[in-house]
Amino acid sequence: MLRGVVLIGLAAVFWGTTGSVTTILIARADAEPFLIGAARMWVAALVLVTGAKLIGAGPTRAARALPHCLAMGACMAIYQAAYFSAVALTGIAVTALIAICSAPLMIATLAAAALGERLTRRTGTALVLGVIGTALLIATPPTTTAPAPRFLIGVALALAAGLAYAVYVVIAKAAVAQANSLAVTAVTFAAAAVLTLPFLAWTHAPLTQAAQGWPWLLYLGAIATAGAYALYTLGLRHVPASVAGVVTLLEPLTATLLGVWMFAERLGPAGLVGALLLFAAIWLTLPRAETATRPG
């Protein structure tokens, strides 16, 4: 189990760099969110498919889990569309708060219903601490001036993003039990890349944006997406989906620490408490000493 926690933790750290890189992309290349979402899916798909073929885990190795892969690809495309649309309506902070905090709760609920996973007291405590810690870490006083209907639509879209991610995790947990994890991830992102093509219809001069921001788009797709999801899917073989949901809360912690370091953002008292709660939640997901030496 420890191996799975470490792999998923590394994936979450890579995901946590996305916000900082996106900020740089928007500032230096004037990149639009939909272009970023589509480009990262295409780069990730190319890297994953190539990597899978090189190590003998081509798409055919995912044949038994093909329906799962297609469903996961749809979830990933829906997540991109819902999340970035929510950002446009409610802002980054509110969207992140709702999507990131709701996802672990949804994962635990869906995993119990679809996979028969039992939520232990230890994992349940970690889940509660993690959600509260994340809320404290990234919550900001509401400053939006958007009309109420517009704001409510944004909230609904943020919840839809959280649900899409939760469904992805639960399906992925079932898929990796049937087929090679890297092959599953490669096919999933190939499907997601195709499904994000319509995003470009709402993007101004996508080729120009891609040309100006290609180094950061390459990082987002190859490292923060392809590499991270490959690690995550492999880690899912070793931990329950509910535990994975808690460990991925390292993402907002990483994003916040990078914001403090790179952009001189301030972490107030509530943020410090939130960070400590997140560390406590992650610690609770680690296997106990008496079980840490047991295989798998």
Image (cartoon, rainbow, N blue to C red):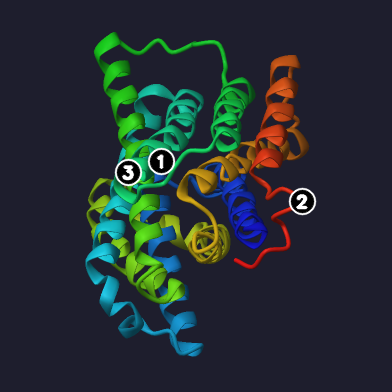
Dividing the image into 4 quarters, which one contains the C terminus? bottom right
Which of 291/172 is in front? 291
Q: Quadrant of the N terminus?
A: bottom right
Residue 260 position by quadrant: top right
Callout in the foreground (1, 3): 1
Determine the residue positioned at 47% across, 37% down.
Answer: 104
Q: As rendered, which of 213 and 186 lies closer to the eye?
A: 186
Q: Position of residue 278 (x, y in %)?
A: 67, 32
- Front residue of 239 and 148: 239
Q: Position of residue 153 (x, y in %)?
A: 26, 22
For the residues labelled 1 and 3, the Cα–Cα distance comes to 10 Å
- Residue at position x 60%, y 33% from top? 126
Say what secondary structure mark 2 lies in.
loop
Please state the horizontal and vertical placement of residue 62, each as a whole percent of the image.
33, 77
Q: Which residue is mark 1?
A: 107
Asked which secondary structure carries label 3, the reply is helix
Q: Hey, what amino acid is under mark 1? A: Ile
In the rendered structure, which disc, 1 or 3, sits on the residue that comes first in sequence? 1
Q: Amino acid at mark 3?
A: Ala
Amino acid type, mark 2: Ala
Return the mark for residue 164: 3
What residue is at 56 percent from the left and 64 percent from the top?
A: 231
Question: Is residue 9 positioned above or below 262 on the image?
Answer: below
Identify the image quadrant of residue 248. Answer: top right
* Badge 3 or badge 2: first in the primary sequence: 3
Residues at marks 3 and 2, CA–CA distance in whole angstroms: 35 Å
Residue 60 locus on image (x, y percent): 31, 84
Report, in whole angstroms, how far the alpha carbon at label 2 lies from the one at label 1.
26 Å
Q: Nearer the viewer, mark 2 or mark 1?
A: 2
Left or right? Give the position of 271 relative to 134. Answer: right
Query: In the picture provided, is 229 more to the left or to the right than 259?
Result: left
Residue 182, above or below 221: below
